[in-house]
Image (cartoon, coloured by chain):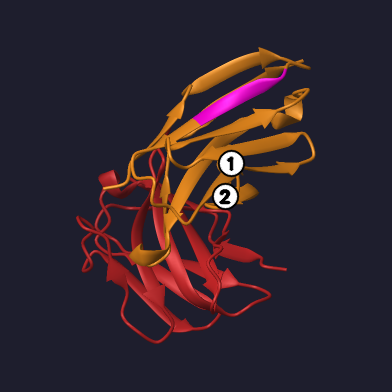
Amino acid sequence: GAVVSQHPSRVICKSGTSVKIECRSLDFQATTMFWYRQFPKQSLMLMATSNEGSKATYEQGVEKDKFLINHASLTLSTLTVTSAHPEDSSFYICSARRRGGYEQYFGPGTRLTVT
Amino acid sequence: KQEVTQIPAALSVPEGENLVLNCSFTDSAIYNLQWFRQDPGKGLTSLLLIQSSQREQTSGRLNASLDKSSGRSTLYIAASQPGDSATYLCAVRRWEYGNKLVFGAGTILRVKS
């Protein structure tokens, strides 16, 4: 158990448009989901933490109006990159955590390319 | 602020060699430490998790040690195989900070056949 999926796996969008990335926990209920960004040859940087039914908590330096996070159900969180620019091109990875647990289960990631 | 450093940044070894990857962290007040594997363009696979009260964990050819007081962990891979080629990330967790993981930049391992 503890499988997390992401969709899409790859997306290319034009500068100025918005793109939505989905993160789903397939076989468990995720009360908390995390969104990370990873630039080439760099580590994962936590962008925000979302708890089901409440607003996301963003890390310092992450624009909440640009990276909209919604955690509407116990199995789905979405990250919307609004008005995307080439510098937003990156690998976005989500993880999910069960209620009362601490271990995070990671999705396979989404490669975003903004042209 | 917790910082995690991994050395070396990259490593290339012949098949069959035993190897050690290093991870250090600046704040020793951790809840646990976790080693992950990441294949190119993929997500993370958890390898080993060591609680702060533990000294080591083993899984197959992998052995991870933890010296919390000195802020160090090592991942030992025995009899390396080409299939071990990947990026290895270590991450530390502090319970008070919302259970967040702080990652190192990783070690890129290439095992040559």
Magenta segment, which residues? B18-22
Quadrant in the picture for the N terminus of chain A: bottom right
Residue B97 percent coordinates (x, y): 34, 63
Q: What residue is pinned by disc 2? A: B43
Residue at the image point whose x is 77% and y is 15% from the top: B113
Q: Main secondary structure of the magenta part?
A: strand
Q: Give a yes or no on whether discs 2 and 1 share a subunit.
A: yes
Earlier sequence position, callout 2 versus callout 1:
1
Residue at the image point whose x is 46% and y is 24% from the top: B9
Apparent side of residue B58 relative to residue A72 in the rendered image (left or right):
right
Of A86 and A49, the residue lying toward us: A49
Residue at the image point whose x is 60% and y is 43% from the top: B55
Q: Colour of chain B?
A: orange
Q: Amino acid at mark 2?
A: Gly
Residue A75 percent coordinates (x, y): 56, 79
**Dot 2 crowding, Cα within 10 Å, few <14, some 14–19, many 20+:** many
Q: Colour of chain A?
A: red
Q: What residue is pinned by disc 1? A: B38
Q: Are marks 2 and 1 in contact (CB under 8 Å)?
A: yes
Location of residue A15 with respect to A64 vertically, above or below: above
- Helix, strand or loop at label 2? It is loop
Q: Quadrant of residue A80?
A: bottom left
